[in-house]
Amino acid sequence: MNILKFGGTSVGSVDSISALIEILKPLQGQENPVVVLSAMGGVTNTLLEMAESAKDLQDYTERLKLVEEKHFKVIRTLLPASAQNPVLTKLKICFNELEDILQSVYNLRELSPQTKDLILSYGERCATIMVSHIAKQQFPEALYVDGSELIKTDSNFGQAKVNTQITEMLIRDFYKDHQDKLLFVTGFISSNDEGRVTTLGRGGSDYTAAIWGAALNADQIEIWTDVDGMLTADPRMVKKAFSLPELSYTEAMELSYFGAKVIYPPTMIPAFLKRIPIVIKNTFNTDFAGTYIKHGISPSPLPIKGISSIDEISVLNLSGSGMVGKAGFSGRLFSMLSREQVNVVLITQSSSEHSITFAVKPADSLKALSLINKEFELELQARKLEYPEVENGLSVLAIVGENMKRTPGMSGKLFSALGRNGVNVRAIAQGSSEYNISVIISKTDLSKAVNAVHDAFYADLKKTLHIFCLGTGNIGKTLFRQLQEQMPFLAANNDLQVKVMGISNTRTMLLNPDGIDLATWEEELDAQETKASLPDFIKRMKSMNLPNCVFVDNTASHNPIEYYLDILQSSISVVTCNKLGNSADYEQYAAFKQAARTYGVDFFYETNVGAGLPIIRTLRDLMLSGDQVGRIEAILSGTISYIFNNYKNGVLFHEVVKEAQDKGYTEPDPRDDLNGKDFMRKMLILARDAGYALEEKDIDLQNMLPASCMAAESVADFYQELENNTAYFENLKSEATNNNKVLRYIGKLEDGKVSINLQMVDENHPFFTLSGSDNIISFTTNRYKDRPLVVKGPGAGAEVTAAGVFADIINVGKR
Ligand SMILES: NC(=O)c1ccc[n+]([C@@H]2O[C@H](COP(=O)([O-])OP(=O)(O)OC[C@H]3O[C@@H](n4cnc5c(N)ncnc54)[C@H](O)[C@@H]3O)[C@@H](O)[C@H]2O)c1
Ligand SMILES: N[C@@H](CCO)C(=O)O
Ligand code: NA
């Protein structure tokens, strides 16, 4: 049985509540989970503010109306009219009670901690009443549970201490009687012996989930929030921060102690004691597999798990001869501070025992100072101690991870990263567990320091490209061979690793979180039982959630194209030799480019034009450096080029076509080459890259095939028709040779217009001398005006194409 806790953002809006219901749907038919809910996002704060306002005789009624309306709006949107009344009535009763309480606070001008807790409890109650009723539409067994009656605490209002024994008994009894129900339980609220409402303090709803989990021995506690679990650093500060798949309890505690706001550590203790795994999931990204916090995590390749920080900290330094050799001095200092409820965040002591430095929250600093002055009055007067001063404007940065214990050089890495970036370290502390090294630095350095440290620790990992490849035909196969051959060189010369994480063709698919062995990929893929499914492949790619991910499309299929946008929007780069994406609607082409820009990833397609020849790249460089393309003239069909270069006496036209296919120059379907479609796509892509928003219909394509060849249904028929038209092709050839000319199929872009024609050119034409599958392209631009920029060479074939795809992948790695 699982406990699912949804935080404020997950119950904060119509959309998020719909998402929540979607998350519960697949659980139908299984053992019912227990669902714990927070108040709607923002409501707890508003309740607090209203209570304070009432006490200060200020108006709160406007805000009360807004809170009420916020709940009603969800009900009206998500429930059919016939189902609205009962729940609106229940909520109305709650809001009337709340209004009465606030009015009493107003009348008495007094807000006791217990009244505050009572007021706050309406946040969780109203949200849970609301969501449980909405859920009833899907799950008739949904039941609202006021959890305050089941969690028993002392009377420390605002931060009540739980009586575990009674609480667990009450929860178990209640659950036994209601196992067949889908329970929606209010988080955060509890009650004391007299039945008065208490609250569990910060992170209280997580705590409720952990208490229920422990009482019922749950299999798992899921904390649903609005981010992808715990990250290596605060993503607002570190753009390259990434989600962590697994953490030990200790690591999670250390990480959240400083900063990470995802969960609040004390709430985990009941789960920790019972060894119940906690998983942090994202309501708004259900593809994210979650961050698991549990016992026995698998060995991690990460040197550290994360970097956390406290923005604002104050430091006090105590020094003087009076401390030297005085047993119990620091004991006296810190037990005094703890007695007075000053939370000490970090302590360091010099080995000479001449000074102690410790950090506290800025709000506690003056209190700490005056406490010290009082406690050590005699020593201070006798000058055995220096008068301490408070230093502000400081931050704490901590690196956290169990691997630190085993790996030498961790602190070296930390301090050299800080040093290289000119960050001065004010004080250092290492937790005795060796799970944490903390430094105090100037607040103005914090962002730079966290980024520098993140780079230092994750750079090696960042230099691994994780690729997911579609298509194992001509190009795909060749690419894998090239990758395998080149791996050692890349590692040695570029510190770059390329790991193939997934491969799929139309039959089967293979994904391996450790990377696929390129020596045996083919047998492994063939042996897979799972039938290929593109949506599953992409889903699994996304849920691996790896840094530096590249999706490689080596197919000639329409299917992958429809996922490009989603993939780019998941911050995964796309490398493709498939031209179908860029040559469909202009709008789609533009959307791919925009998505890559917005999500900071790459969309590379060099091999769409001229295979491995640097044509797209050259054009991009021209455009980026402010040049303007006036004219492009090109031969961009490797297949047709090969055919015209090898269509000599003694060989028939259809035989040369077959040769081109056997050499791997043609499209999977050679008709796409011969009818000019493939060429047209390339010209369209070039024109678009040159800044013209053209569509296929704008291109003037002269088809060089006789109608009967065009009409052929299968590839075999097509070859037959080519043979039937032998005379037509022979005529073309002799007409050209008789005039000392050669046949050339030439594309042109001029004045924003594109045409493709069959021409006969003589030796004065720059395209006269070509051989093999050569492509040639000449750019006439503002800067290359008198003599054009020309790129020429083999423009088809598996080796050169795979090499182009390879280069695109490496270029993703360079960023
Ligand atoms: N041959 C060249 O010189 C050259 C040059 C540039 C670009 N290209 C492009 O390379 C691409 C591949 O050409 P090829 O000769 O390797 O083709 P191919 O027919 O040999 O291989 C295509 C592969 O794609 C797989 N595939 C098709 N649809 C799929 C889907 N929906 N999901 C997963 N896998 C799928 C097939 O199973 C097959 O393994 C084409 O788009 C082509 O235009 C080829
Ligand atoms: N079939 C293509 C491959 C290169 O895109 C050609 O012949 O040019
Ligand atoms: Na190219």
Image (cartoon, rainbow, N blue to C red):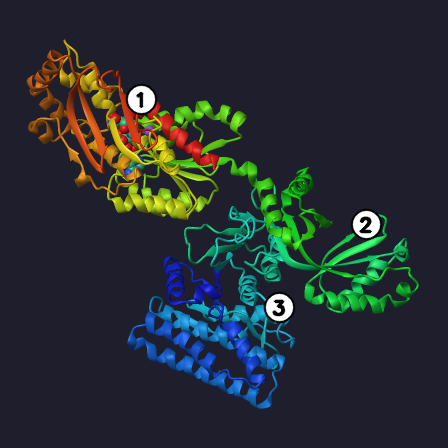
Whether residue 534 appears in this view of the structure is yes
View quadrant of ligand 3? top left
In-image side of 582 versus 131 (left or right): left
Q: Nearer the viewer, mark 2 or mark 3?
A: 2
Give the residue at mark 3. 164
Give the image location of residue 595, x and y in percent.
Answer: 37, 47
Query: Ligand 3 within 8 A of label 1's CB?
Result: no
Q: Nearer the viewer, residue 442 or 656?
A: 442
In-image side of 713 versus 35 (left or right): left
- What amino acid type is highlighted by mark number 3? Thr
In-image side of 722 versus 533 (left or right): left
- Identify the secondary structure beneath mark 1: strand
Give the image location of residue 123, x and y in percent.
Answer: 49, 74
Q: CA distance from mark 1 to mark 3?
A: 78 Å
Find out whether the residues at labels 1 and 3 contact each other: C-beta distance under 8 Å: no
- What amino acid type is highlighted by mark number 1? Lys
Q: Which mark, residue 792?
A: 1
Query: Ligand 1 within 8 A of label 3's CB?
Result: no
Q: Which mark, residue 350?
A: 2
- What amino acid type is highlighted by mark number 2? Ser
- Identify the secondary structure beneath mark 3: helix
Mark 3 residue crowding within 10 angstroms, few (<14) / some (14–19) / many (20+): some
Find out whether the residues at labels 2 and 1 contact each other: C-beta distance under 8 Å: no
Q: Residue furthest top?
A: 650
Whether residue 664 appears in this view of the structure is no
Q: CA distance from mark 2 to mark 3?
A: 42 Å
